[in-house]
């Protein structure tokens, strides 16, 4: 834990006479970012990180400047899913430099600050709050159209920290069609209402699987539950993403699904959701 803390706490170097105000640093950094989107889920296993990554790639493919920050402190998967390796570097202003995925997309994750990727990070709330604040204020994000924030499932420390630090953040909530996920996603919706965070919309992931042999659509997790939940709670339904084994394979390999399967139904859905997000600009 001490190594990880040393890795992210770049503000405490001995050659600094005065420690910068972290809140002022975060505010200055956020002022250069047009739209901040936190991707949430009520429970684990709904493909939230996969949605975050592919949504960021879809926006970048449309020419927008995009950053993605992994605030899932205990289970950071962004670097592996995007095929990013190596440690974060520091620029001449002593700011962390995001790892570039493409000309329009860069990422920051706690995993990119850990020497041993398999080390467990055993932190309580205050330390996590400080780390997330540094991911914003101590990172040279520059001018961005979108900052995609991938949070852990549930309504705990990480999404609460984002709500406190980024007053104009908007939420995209990911669910599967099955009722157990929908029950938990309603808690995420109520969390956003409690902390006064606007909800941009809801995405139904893993919505139907097309058999590669007979082309029959099999609704493994049910169908339509996400859209129904969006209607009953008065939020926008952004799209239904089918279950595709190739997406799982690409995520495990750290390769771009949308590049490999640009004409797929899944790639089109992400492109359509990115189009809907254009109204935020």
Image: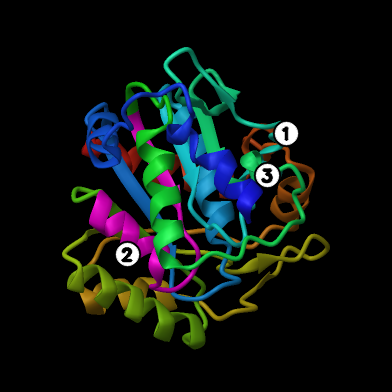
Q: Earlier in the sequence, mark 1 or mark 3?
A: 1
| Residue at (55% x, 81% y) in the render | 222
Give the magenta-colored segment's residue range.
Answer: 145-165
Of all residues, the one furthest to the top in this rendering is 92
Q: Circle 1 — which element?
A: loop
Q: Which residue is mark 1?
A: 85
Q: Earlier in the sequence, mark 2 or mark 3?
A: 3
Tell how many labels.
Answer: 3
Q: Is residue 162 magenta?
A: yes
Q: Which residue is mark 2?
A: 160
Neighbour tally class for label 1: few under 14, some 14-19, many 20 plus, Cα within 10 Å? few
Residue 112, quarter of picture: top right
- Please provide percent x and percent y for residue 258: 62, 37
* Nearer the camera: disc 1 or disc 3: 3
* Front-most of residues 12 and 118: 12
Q: Circle 3 — which element?
A: loop
Q: Is residue 109 visible?
A: no
| Residue at (40% x, 33% y) in the render | 138
Q: Residue 114: which disc?
A: 3
Q: Circle 2 — which element?
A: helix
- Please provide percent x and percent y for residue 195: 20, 67
Quadrant location of the N terminus in the rendered image: bottom right
- Please provide percent x and percent y for residue 254: 73, 41
Distance (Cα) linking label 1 and label 3? 11 Å
In the picture, measured across the screen, residue 225 lies left or right of residue 86, that is: left
Are circles 1 and 3 on residues that touch, CB within 8 Å? no
- Please provide percent x and percent y for residue 29: 29, 30
């Amino acid at each position: 834990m001490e190594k990880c803390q040393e890795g992210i706490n770049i503000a405490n170097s001995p050659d600094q006479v005065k420690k910068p105000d972290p809140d002022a640093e975060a505010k200055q950094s956020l002022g250069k970012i047009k739209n901040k989107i936190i991707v949430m889920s009520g429970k684990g296993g709904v493909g939230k990180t996969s949605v975050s990554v592919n949504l960021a790639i879809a926006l970048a493919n449309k020419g927008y400047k995009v950053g993605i920050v992994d605030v899932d402190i205990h289970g950071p998967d962004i670097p592996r899913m995007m095929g990013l390796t190596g440690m974060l570097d520091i620029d001449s202003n002593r700011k962390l430099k995001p790892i570039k995925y493409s000309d329009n997309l860069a990422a920051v994750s706690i995993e990119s600050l850990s020497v041993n990727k398999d080390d467990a990070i055993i932190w309580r709330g205050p330390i996590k709050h400080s780390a997330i604040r540094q991911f914003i204020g101590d990172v040279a994000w520059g001018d961005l159209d979108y900052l995609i924030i991938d949070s852990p499932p549930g309504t705990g420390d990480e999404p609460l920290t984002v709500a406190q630090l980024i007053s104009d953040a908007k939420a995209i909530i990911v669910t599967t069609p099955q009722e157990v996920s929908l029950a938990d996603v309603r808690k995420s919706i109520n969390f956003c209402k409690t902390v006064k965070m606007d909800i941009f919309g809801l995405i139904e992931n893993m919505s139907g699987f097309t058999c590669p042999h007979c082309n029959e659509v099999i609704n493994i997790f049910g169908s339509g539950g996400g859209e129904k939940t969006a209607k009953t709670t008065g939020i926008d339904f952004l799209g239904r993403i089918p279950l595709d084994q190739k997406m799982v394979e690409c995520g495990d390999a750290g390769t771009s699904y949308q590049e490999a399967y640009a004409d797929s139904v899944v790639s089109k859905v992400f492109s359509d959701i990115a189009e809907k997000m254009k109204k935020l600009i």
